[in-house]
Amino acid sequence: MKQLDSIARLINKFTKLPGVGAKTAQRYAYGVLDMTEAEVADFCDAMTEVKRTVRYCVECGNLTDKDVCDICERRDKSIICVVAYPKDVLALERISGYTGVYHVLHGTLNPMEGRGPDDLHIKQLLARLDGVEEVIMATNPDVEGEATAMYVARLLKPLGIKVTRIAQGISMGSELEYADEVTLSRALEARTEL
């Protein structure tokens, strides 16, 4: 039996989401079919609202619903923690004790995928260094994250800014969003200068 075109289209749309393969997309599509029309409308409204109201902070690049995020408005701007993605800010915010601001690069260097320095928000970082005493590199401890951290450190060192790297309490190849609070806290506390 051939799959209906509308179901195939919905499955195809779900496969566009990161980490969603064909089988998962099919489960999602059939899950939508099990919803009431009101639930589907609410689901669509939630997606539309996110696209309409959520944007990137003009200072740090994190997700916010206003021009400048709450973190940039109220935190110590003399310390910037550089991360690859907004989800990494959420991971680091789970721990208490960090009082600085963030800078989201929106990716890491990856020549194999054609992602170079101009594809990241490095220029925006360089533009906000006035009064900054320390930049903490908190990219993932994988090849791309390490390359990105070293690249940014080489740009900042001549400017006289202290550049540190989160400690390797996080295992190589893992992602920040999956690390527990204790590991993240220790990694942040035991950061080293690059």
Image (spheres, helix red, strand yellow):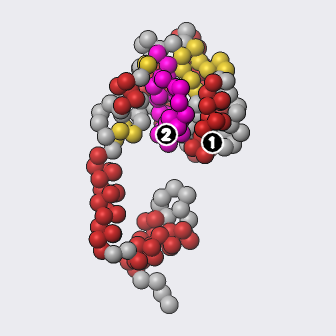
Name the residue located 51 percent from the left edge and 12 percent from the top edge. 133
Horizontally, residue 169 falls left or right of residue 93, namely right
Question: Which residue matches tag 1?
Answer: 179
Q: Secondary structure at mark 1?
A: loop
Residue 46 visible (yes or no): yes
Question: What amino acid is labelled 1 in the image?
Answer: Ala
Question: Which residue matches tag 2?
Answer: 90
> Dot 2, crowdedness within 10 Å: few (<14), some or many (≥20)?
some
Q: Quadrant of the C terminus?
A: top right
Q: Position of residue 112 (x, y in %)?
A: 62, 44
The mark tally for this picture is 2
Q: Does label 2 or label 1 sit earlier along the sequence?
A: 2
Name the residue located 66 percent from the left edge and 43 percent from the top edge. 174
Q: Position of residue 79 (x, y in %)?
A: 50, 19
* Depth check, front residue: 179 or 57: 179
**Can you name the residue that lies furthest to the bottom here?**
1
Question: What amino acid is labelled 2 in the image?
Answer: Leu
Q: Against 106, is 26 above or below? A: below
Q: Position of residue 103 (x, y in %)?
A: 47, 29
Horizontally, residue 74 falls left or right of residue 78, namely left
Bounds of the magenta segment: 78-107
Q: Against 128, is 103 above or below? A: below
Name the residue located 56 percent from the left edge and 65 percent from the top edge. 21
Q: Check residue 79 for magenta coloring.
A: yes
Q: CA distance from mark 2 to mark 1?
A: 11 Å
Quadrant of residue 31 within the rendered picture: bottom left
Q: Which mark is residue 82?
A: none
